[in-house]
Amino acid sequence: MAVQHYSGGCQCGAVHYEVDVDLDRTVTCNCSRCRRVGGILAFAPASAFTLTSGEGKTTEYLFNTGKIHHLFCTTCGIESFARGTAPDGTETVAVNARCLDGVDVKSLHPIEYDGASK
Ligand SMILES: [Zn+2]
């Protein structure tokens, strides 16, 4: 698949974005949040992500080390993306592949990340 262009967002449409991301490299996680939310994450540099609507329409949630800014829609509650910083310092966005338009998530093969042990 390599890097391709996608649009995505929350359920109600208040939050919408465009992103260039590689869905060959997706991750699920078993931390206390991810095991509840069930998202399939794909990572892209912040420079490859454009929030086209929804600035100011999200609530931020921080937990554990507080390094990942979980942003969910204040209307419908869906967390379609999060912001953080990669270990090398790159500003990074994690998009939830379940929130991307036209993606069949059954075709993805996410790596299981053991966030519960970190
Ligand atoms: Zn929404």
Image (cartoon, rainbow, N blue to C red):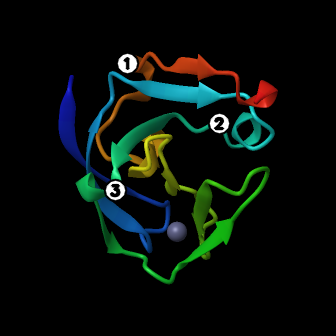
**CA neighbours of label 3 inside 10 A, class few (<14), some (14 to 19), many (20+):** some
Q: Extreme bottom residue here?
A: 56
**CA neighbours of label 1 inside 10 A, class few (<14), some (14 to 19), many (20+):** few
Q: Residue at label 3? A: 46
Q: Residue at label 2? A: 38
Is label 2 in a helix, a strand or a loop? loop
Marks 2 and 3, how far apart at CA: 23 Å
Marks 2 and 1, how far apart at CA: 16 Å
In this view, the mark in front (2 or 3): 3
**CA neighbours of label 2 inside 10 A, class few (<14), some (14 to 19), many (20+):** few
**Dot 1 or dot 3, earlier in sequence:** 3
Quarter residue 69 falls in: bottom right
Question: Residue 33, image x and y in percent?
Answer: 75, 44
Which residue is rendered at x = 73% and y = 28% of the image?
A: 30
Check whether the beta carbons of the residues at disc 2 and disc 3 lie within 8 A of each other: no
Which residue is rendered at x = 42% and y = 37% of the image?
A: 42
Quarter residue 36 falls in: top right
Q: Is residue 65 above or below residue 4?
A: below
In this view, the residue in front, 92 or 23, is 92
Q: Is residue 109 above or below residue 33?
A: above
The three-letter amino acid code for the residue at tag 3 is: Ala
Q: Which mark is residue 81?
A: none
Quadrant of image for the N terminus = top left
The three-letter amino acid code for the residue at tag 2 is: Gly
Q: How many marks?
A: 3
**Dot 2 or dot 1, earlier in sequence:** 2
In this view, the mark in front (1 or 3): 3
Q: Residue at label 1? A: 107
